[in-house]
Image: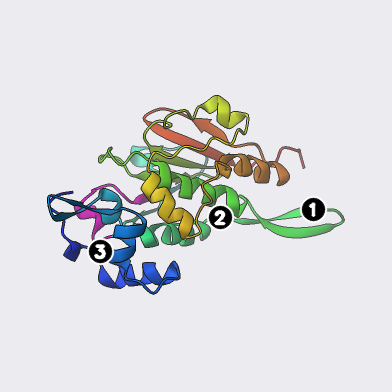
Amino acid sequence: MHEARLEDLDAALLSQFAQRLGGPRSGEDILYVDYRLIDCQSGRLRLTLAALLLARDPLRWHPRCGVDFVKFEGTERRYGADLNIVCRARIECPLFRLIDEAFVLIKEHVRERTVLHDLFFVEQFEYPAFAWQEAIVNTVAHRDYSLTGASIEVWMFDDRLEVRSPGELPGPVTLELLARRERVHFSRNPLLVRVLTDLGYMRDLGEGIPRMFEVMEKSYLRLPVTQDGFMFQVTLRNTPIYDP
């Protein structure tokens, strides 16, 4: 982004970023040296889009870089006079805070239920935390940021949670590999993935989707369903495998 300047980065946010990574150096130095989110061309510093997603106003550089959350009443989306949206919120903030704020918002709407475990009734959430949080992290890390007309979408219905990521599956990743729980290690946005890995949001080992399948299975819930297309979609259902 040649028109962007260092002044467009949020100094306080960069300081928090540096502290979270546990280093005494400046955030600008870390972005330039460690992550190559700032480079130098013809004697001028150039900020990459990945760096500007950490800026104080990321919408200036990417109009749909946030998360659009919609909660519907019932199991289908309705329109017009039957519109069934009960909550809608857009999370638009620097990447450093985007995932955390998305977690807080969505967690408010994930219900607890009473289930029988061995001989005791226990409370558990309708979706395992790792499963839906991994879906959010994956969309932020791997969405196609060249598509500026679409946001990450999280749609919640009574029976399922749909997480949509702008862009098709990247490179060698296929629905068949995901269904087989193969650990496919490929990043569309390797610079962002490195930042998110060092911040502790992911491990960059290609294990996220297989673990998502595993925790859903261990919770006796139906396995995630993935769909490819202009928007790659992961669907988590809260319906137990077994009849009560």
Q: Label 3 to label 2, Cα distance in Å?
A: 30 Å
Instruction: Write down the residue under mark 3.
Output: 56
Element assignment for label 1: strand
Instruction: Decide which of tag 1 and tag 3 comes sooner along the chain.
Output: 3
Q: Earlier in the sequence, mark 3 or mark 2?
A: 3
Whether residue 136 sits left or right of residue 7 in the image: it is: right
* Residue 29 seen: yes
Residue of label 2 = 110
Q: Amino acid at mark 1?
A: Leu
- Pinpoint residue 41: horizontal percent, then vertical percent: 16, 49
How far from the left and from the top, in percent, is residue 56? 25, 63
Residue 49 sits inside the magenta stretch: no
User: What residue occupies the far front of the structure in this picture?
Assistant: 43
Q: Position of residue 244 (x, y in %)?
A: 77, 42
The residue tagged 1 is: 116
Counting from the top left corner in percent of width and height, residue 124 is at 68, 57
Range of the magenta residues? 55-67
